[in-house]
Image: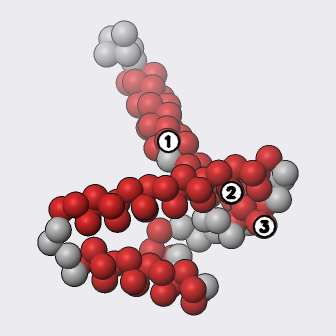
Amino acid sequence: KVVNKPPDERAFAAQQATLINHAYSVLRTPLSRANYILTQKGLDVGEGSERTITDPELLMQVLEAREEVEGTDDAVRLGELLEANRKEQARLVRSLSAAFREQAWQGGAGHT
């Protein structure tokens, strides 16, 4: 057990646990995993709040979806929107996976 080890070994074990937890959180979701791979391939994907939508069609799609969600109280309609969103996410993950299989890193970046 680490508890009975000297302070330097406990600190090292804590550091390793932190690294493992961070690695798990990065690899857990397809988007963060893809961003990590693209970063390793030398592409600047910009994550989180640094990201902006530059594609006007995508921006319009996002705004319309948000409007529709905010504008309905119908649980059935919200469920339909959620299901449509899940299907679109699955489609994008498949496209991203195909780009990665072909090592089309720039094309893959377009799906993140």
- Count neighbours of disc 1 (C-alpha within 10 A) and say few if under 14, some if 14 to 19, many if 20 or more: few
- Count neighbours of disc 3 (C-alpha within 10 A) and say few if under 14, some if 14 to 19, many if 20 or more: some
In the displayed structure, does residue 66 sit left or right of residue 15?
A: left
Please count the marks in the image. 3
| Pointer 2 with pointer 3, Cβ within 8 A | no
The quadrant holding residue 45 is: bottom right
Residue 64 location (% of width, % of height): 39, 83
Q: Which residue is mark 3?
A: 106
Q: CA distance from mark 3 to mark 1?
A: 22 Å
Q: Is residue 84 above or below residue 30?
A: below
Q: Residue at x 50, y 84 (%)?
A: 59
Report the front residue among 73 and 46.
Answer: 73
Q: Residue at x 37, y 10 (%)?
A: 1
Of the numbered discs 2 and 3, the one sitting upstream in the chain is 2
Residue 30 location (% of width, % of height): 55, 49
The quadrant holding residue 78 is: bottom left
The quadrant holding residue 83 is: bottom left
Secondary element at tag 2: helix
Q: Which residue is mark 1?
A: 28
Give the amino acid at mark 3: Gln
Secondary element at tag 1: helix
Q: Is residue 32 visible?
A: no
Q: Which residue is mark 2?
A: 95
Q: Residue at x 68, y 56 (%)?
A: 96
Of the numbered discs 1 and 2, the one sitting upstream in the chain is 1
Q: CA distance from mark 1 to mark 2?
A: 18 Å
Residue 17 location (% of width, % of height): 44, 31
Q: Residue at x 82, y 59 (%)?
A: 104
In the displayed structure, does residue 90 sit left or right of residue 105?
A: left
